[in-house]
Image (cartoon, grey):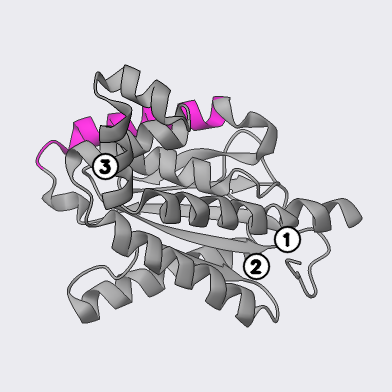
Amino acid sequence: MFMMIGEAHPYIAIIGDIVESKKIKNREDVQEKLKQTLNHVNKEYNDVIASKFVITLGDEFQGLLNLGQYTMEIIYYIKKELYPVKIRFGVGVGSISTRINKDMAIGADGPGYYKAREAINNLKNLENKKKKALYDIQILINGDNRLQELSLNSIFKLMYSIECHWTSKQREIINYMLFENDNQSIAAQHFGVSQSNIQQLLSKSHYYAYEESFCAINSILNEVNYHAKLS
């Protein structure tokens, strides 16, 4: 069970940050693409969004979820749409101590956002020390939840290590499998190849281990919904 010690009504705060945005040549195009992507997220996942995702700075954005079950879908949809631009994500689980504005995730404050900001800063510091990203998502949970944090962040590291070795074709097919239809036959028809080709590609890219981890994190974060309903 996902424990939220000391949290009567936890939320999931997500802060995203474009990596080395000032070095991007087509920066305006990327910012426009990010704006369109966040608009889609706000529309598609409206039922679980407490405060809509909004760009807070030129290279940073944030949003607030009241349910955890679609956290991974939202993060990876944003990653998919902005690729090859790299984005780091800080995820904070905790209460919000100020008034929540549904229309935009600006002005709200509390442990959930503190943890998301801390996670983003941790990723930046790790990148500065190691000169390269070890993983692109970190989650921090308010309260005495060290074991849950350790488990989730270990999974994020493993997923990132798998993802970094994907070819462009592997990434395209895996994105289709994750977001469109988890069926090899339909994927084969869509890409005009044989099912055995899809099977081989997925096997070489460690897709099923990745997909299982994806679903496991969603299931764990879905417990945030359970505890919120108890409040």
**Residue extent of the magenta highlight:** 25-43
Would you say the residues marked 2 and 1 are in contact, meaning their CB atoms lie under 8 Å apart? yes
Residue at x 20% of width, y 36% of height: 169
Of marks 3 and 2, the one in the foreground: 3
Q: Secondary structure at mark 1?
A: loop
Residue 10: percent from the left, percent from the top? Answer: 73, 59
Quarter the C terminus occupies: bottom right
Residue at x 36% of width, y 70% of height: 123
Quarter the N terminus occupies: bottom right
Residue 68: percent from the left, percent from the top? Answer: 66, 50
Between disc 3 and disc 1, whose residue precedes?
1
The amino acid type found where label 3 is placed reads: Leu
Q: Secondary structure at mark 3?
A: helix
Q: Is residue 94 rendered to the left or right of residue 88?
A: right
Of marks 2 and 1, the one in the foreground: 2
Mark-to-mark CA distance, 3 and 1: 47 Å
218 in relation to 94, above or below: above
Q: Which residue is mark 2?
A: 111
Q: Main secondary structure of the magenta part?
A: helix
Mark-to-mark CA distance, 2 and 1: 8 Å
Q: Is residue 103 rendered to the left or right of residue 206?
A: right
Determine the image quadrant of residue 94: bottom right
The amino acid type found where label 2 is placed reads: Pro
Between disc 3 and disc 2, whose residue precedes?
2
Q: Which residue is mark 1?
A: 97
Q: Is residue 43 rendered to the left or right of residue 193?
A: right
Residue at x 21% of width, y 30% of height: 29
